[in-house]
């Protein structure tokens, strides 16, 4: 990861580094990532909000593909998750992929609520505020996504009964179909 330190700021007796993360932008069609592994095994972070207030959570369900002739991400969030309200109130969000060295940080982001802790502080992640949505400097890849469609999953639409075991509390996910508008990679 390349980080360029621009200057040092002092604010409220805390020191902050203003950093420019040097990531390379590529087309979604240049992606070589195995998303079965990235989402299902390595996990990703879903992050929404802005520089004033944001939240992130670990996601291990989702997909990428083509829909309506656009590169898209399919993202699923349960309504009780703190990130849900940020997703509902934002037009954009990010999906980011990390190396195995961040497994414990991703575990924390998936088991602790941003209502109770500052996840960036607890994990040591450095937030970066893209013009559209936040992500973290430690990511090896970031998908910046623009929401296009949302729909609640529901019991009536289940065909395979075994799926219901994932919803013992009847807390079906909300699905977001989002255009991937930017892909950033850390070489």
Image (spheres, rainbow, N blue to C red):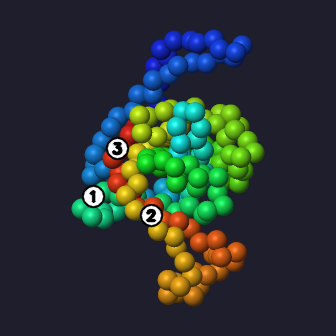
Label 3 Cα neighbours within 10 Å, binned few <14 / some 14-19 / many ≥20? some
Label 1 Cα neighbours within 10 Å, binned few <14 / some 14-19 / many ≥20? few
Q: Position of residue 58 (x, y in %)?
A: 59, 53
Q: Which numbered disc, 2 or 1, marks the residue closer to the eye?
A: 2
Which of the two labelled residues, at mark 2 and mark 3, occupies the earlier sequence position?
A: 2
Question: Horizontal placement of 73 versus 90: left or right?
Answer: left
Q: Are marks 2 and 1 in contact (CB under 8 Å)?
A: no
Question: Horizontal placement of 19 versus 164: left or right?
Answer: left
Q: Residue furthest front?
A: 89
Q: Name the residue at 28% across, 46% down.
A: 27
Which of the two labelled residues, at mark 1 and mark 3, occupies the earlier sequence position?
A: 1
Q: Is residue 21 visible?
A: yes
Q: Judging from the image, what secondary structure is the residue with disc 1 in?
A: strand
**To which residue does mark 1 refer?**
70
Q: Judging from the image, what secondary structure is the residue with disc 2 in?
A: strand
Q: Name the residue at 48% across, 65% down.
A: 175
Q: Judging from the image, what secondary structure is the residue with disc 3 in?
A: strand
Label 2 Cα neighbours within 10 Å, binned few <14 / some 14-19 / many ≥20? some
Q: Which numbered disc, 2 or 3, marks the residue closer to the eye?
A: 2
Which of the two labelled residues, at mark 2 and mark 1, occupies the earlier sequence position?
A: 1
Q: Name the residue at 48% across, 33% down.
A: 129
Q: Is residue 104 visible?
A: no
Asked if residue 44 is positioned above or below residue 138 in the image, the reply reads: below
Q: Give the tally of numbered discs.
A: 3
Asked if residue 84 is positioned above or below residue 154 in the image, the reply reads: above
Q: Are marks 2 and 3 in contact (CB under 8 Å)?
A: no
**To which residue does mark 2 refer?**
150
Label 2 – label 3 distance at C-alpha = 20 Å
Residue 2 sits in quarter: top left
**To which residue does mark 3 refer?**
182
Q: Position of residue 100 (x, y in %)?
A: 57, 47
């Amino acid at each position: 990861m390349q980080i360029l330190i621009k200057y040092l700021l002092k604010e409220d007796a805390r020191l902050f580094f203003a950093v420019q993360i040097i990531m390379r932008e590529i087309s979604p069609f240049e992606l070589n990532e195995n998303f079965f592994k990235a989402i299902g095994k390595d996990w990703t972070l879903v992050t929404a909000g802005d520089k004033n207030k944001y939240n992130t959570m670990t996601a291990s369900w989702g997909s990428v593909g083509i829909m309506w002739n656009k590169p898209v991400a399919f993202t699923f969030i349960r309504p009780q998750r703190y990130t849900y309200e940020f997703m509902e109130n934002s037009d954009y969000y990010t999906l980011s992929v990390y190396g195995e060295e961040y497994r414990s940080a991703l575990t924390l982001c998936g088991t602790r609520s941003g209502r109770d802790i500052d996840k960036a502080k607890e994990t040591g992640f450095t937030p970066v505020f893209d013009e559209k949505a936040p992500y973290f400097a430690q990511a090896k890849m970031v998908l910046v996504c623009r929401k296009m469609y949302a729909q609640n999953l529901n019991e009536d639409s289940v065909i395979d009964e075994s799926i219901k075991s994932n919803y013992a509390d009847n807390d079906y996910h909300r699905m977001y179909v989002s255009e991937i508008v930017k892909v950033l990679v850390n070489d």
